[in-house]
Image: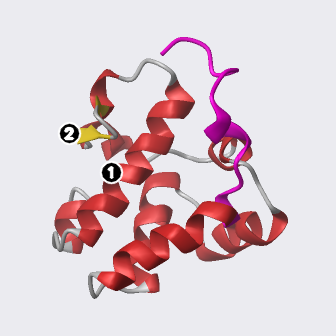
Amino acid sequence: MSGSSGHRILTITLASVYPLYLAKVEKKGRTKDELDAVIRWLTGYDQAEVDQHLAGGSTFADFFEGARLNPNAALITGVICGVRVEAIEDPLMQRIRYLDKLVDELAKGRALEKVLRS
């Protein structure tokens, strides 16, 4: 996946996807607090910054541009949408898929400490 210009997901706002993430985890008995903890862990944002991005209509590109990616993010491995996350070459696309993978693991009932690679 070279170049990020062709990816529609980069123009999608975090606020438009967040309710889908939330519905996915809540359907499996997880909470908004757990989802937010995963987002904060990955991005280095505090809750006020996450809320600001949600309210401000930040695109995924904007959201991840200012993120302070967790040093343990490289420990996120596996397949999401048929693609191995550790093999994605485009850094922004990889970060988006890291988030997808973490949300997926949370929804599948994995312990929060394991999801957060601690």
User: Does the magenta segment cover residue 35?
Assistant: no
Check the image and report above or below for 92 versus 100.
above
- In this picture the colour scheme is secondary structure
Q: What residue type is labelled 1?
A: Lys
Q: In which quarter of the image is residue 97?
A: top left
Check the image and report above or below for 12 versus 3.
below
Asked which secondary structure carries label 2, the reply is loop
Whole-percent x and y of residue 117?
A: 22, 56
Asked which secondary structure carries label 1, the reply is helix
Whole-percent x and y of residue 74?
A: 30, 36
Q: What residue type is labelled 2?
A: Gly
Q: Closest to the observer: 33 or 4? A: 4
Res. 105 visible in picture? yes
What residue is rendered at 38% in x and 86% in y?
A: 31
67 vs 113, left or right, is right
Of marks 1 and 2, which one's residue comes earlier in the chain? 2
What residue is rendered at 48% in x and 63% in y?
A: 39
Q: Closest to the observer: 66 or 30? A: 30
Q: Quadrant of residue 112?
A: bottom left
Whole-percent x and y of residue 93?
A: 51, 32
Disc ID at residue 101: 1
Report the magenta residues as a range. Answer: 1-15
Q: What residue is pinned by disc 2?
A: 78
Q: In which quarter of the image is residue 9?
A: top right
Whole-percent x and y of residue 45?
A: 59, 61
Whether pointer 1 and pointer 2 mark residues with C-beta atoms closer than 8 Å, the reply is yes
Quarter of the picture holding the C terminus: bottom left
What residue is rendered at 37% in x and 42% in y?
A: 71
114 vs 3, left or right, is left
Q: Main secondary structure of the magenta part?
A: loop
